[in-house]
Image (cartoon, grey):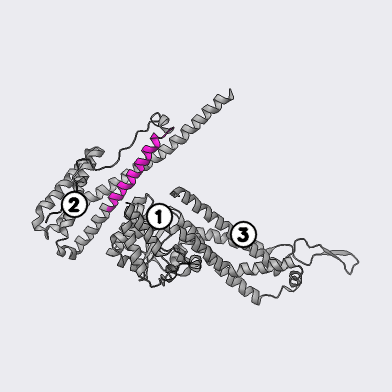
Amino acid sequence: MTIPVIVIALLIVGAIVIYNGLVNLKHQVDNAFKQIDIQLKRRHDLIPNLVNSVKGEMKFESETLEKVVQARAGAVNASKSGSMGDIAANEGLLSQALGKLLAISENYPNLKAIEAVKKLMEELAHTENALSFARQLYNDLVTKFNIKQQVFPNNLFASMLGFIPAVLFELPKDSKERENVKVEF
Amino acid sequence: MNIYEQQTKNKRLTAVIMVVFVAFFLFLGLGFDFFYASFQPQDQAVFTENYDGYYEAEVKNQPIPYGTIIAFIVACFMVGNSALNGAQMVLKSTMARRAKSSNPKEKQFLNIVSEMSIASGLPKPRAYIVPDMDLNAFATGFSPEKSYIAVTQGLIAELNREELQAVVAHEMSHIRNYDIRLMTIVSALMGAIVLLRDFTARRMFYGRGRSSSSSNRSGGGPIMIAIFVLWIIALIFAPFLSRVLAMAISRKREYLADASAAELTRNPKGLISALEKIRNAVMPTKKINNGVAHMCITDPRGSLIEEKLGFTADLLASHPPMEKRILALKVMSYQQ
């Protein structure tokens, strides 16, 4: 009589411990995703300012600038409607366009003399860094969360308690960011 | 060793140090009572016949250990104070000020601090600037919720963005591991011990007025003499011992913070070049005094002690030799 009661009590206690641990991690994952979201918004707000302030100096790079503007528009659209994969793909394109713009801007030493551009460049570097760190934290937490769901004995309870594995914030397979950079002379 | 073990270890060690500090004060207070304030609990009452022909109980020595009680209250106050105001005390002693976002270099520093707080998933620490041209940095605070990162003016002037990021990541890992709590408490209590030593030394030389009856007793037995000697030694060597303790605590934690910094930025090379720049700046950091030395990323007394190997260096250096730290990071970046 007492043994089954003890076993059931232990099972319940175990389930509670597992549930609490998973809820805790799930909130951390959600919070980390919000951080990514904040940084993406900052990035979208920053780009028009940047493009406007460098337009005068970089007349001959209108194609690059145009690409940045287009990529931003795509990213903003994706963030309004899209799924995680959609957002990641569009943001990947934007990162690539921005990277190219920053690399080309090195050829314009005059730009560095403009105080406003210098400030914007620092802001952009900050946002890009913050974005990659936010993504890093998010992916680390998602990995932890998913592992915690799949190890034994948690896997017996996890789906029963309504937990589903979270999705990593990855660049899609065909993203150009994953390709090696070609250096041409 | 993972982060959680390190955190619990640091919290426990902080609690132990607080208790030891209070116990040490009690010991000193009790000694003071015995040797100077004629306290003797097991004294028998002496019965003397007074003029009226009655016997009256008279206790020559007072039974209340005032010194011990006062020492206990003072010690508890100091422990509480170091927990509440320790970080502010440390910052004040280095004359640090808040970083301003109007200055572009300091704005960059502020940005980097917020990046690293995102990377570590911790609340954003407050950023401070120490007005000194040497290259150094430290973190302080009682918990990650209320923490401070301070760097010298020279550091933000000399290091590039990547290197500054590595240094901030190093300090961020001190915050995450609760090293800051331990270090700040040690720092604040160390200051209290030095104060106490100075106070009691003066008391011993100038205040021997009331000790006529107790000096007879302290000459009474060899055990008492031994305790008396021990008491004096504890009093004199406390500041030195606490310094050695602080250094020993700090040294081990530097490697771990270096490693976690590289993990946070995923870029050991940034920290390597930052440490090399810091190492080449051999000037001592004048604004940072010895009481805060163990909290800094490198020894503020200049790199002379750190470069030496051997027993004395092991005893007194607050940081492992820079060469060893850089080597450990190089191994890490090679493995990547």
In the depicted structure, whether residue A61 falls above or below residue B29:
above
Q: Nearer the viewer, residue B77 or B184?
A: B184
Q: Label 1 belongs to which residue?
A: B173
| Chain identity of mark 3 | B
Query: Do residues under tags 1 and 3 come within 8 Å of each other at their CB atoms?
Result: no
Is residue B295 one of those drawn in magenta? no
Q: Tell me what residue is drawn at x 67 percent, y 63 percent.
A: B30
Which residues, given as a range, are shown in magenta? A129-152
Q: Name the amino acid type tagged 3.
A: Ala
Q: CA distance from mark 2 to mark 1?
A: 31 Å
Quarter location, residue A30 = top left
Q: Tell me what residue is drawn at x 44 percent, y 32 percent.
A: A153
Q: Main secondary structure of the magenta part?
A: helix
Extreme left residue here? Answer: A60
Both on one chain, marks 3 and 2?
A: no
Of the numbered discs in the image, which one, if any, rests on residue B152? Answer: none
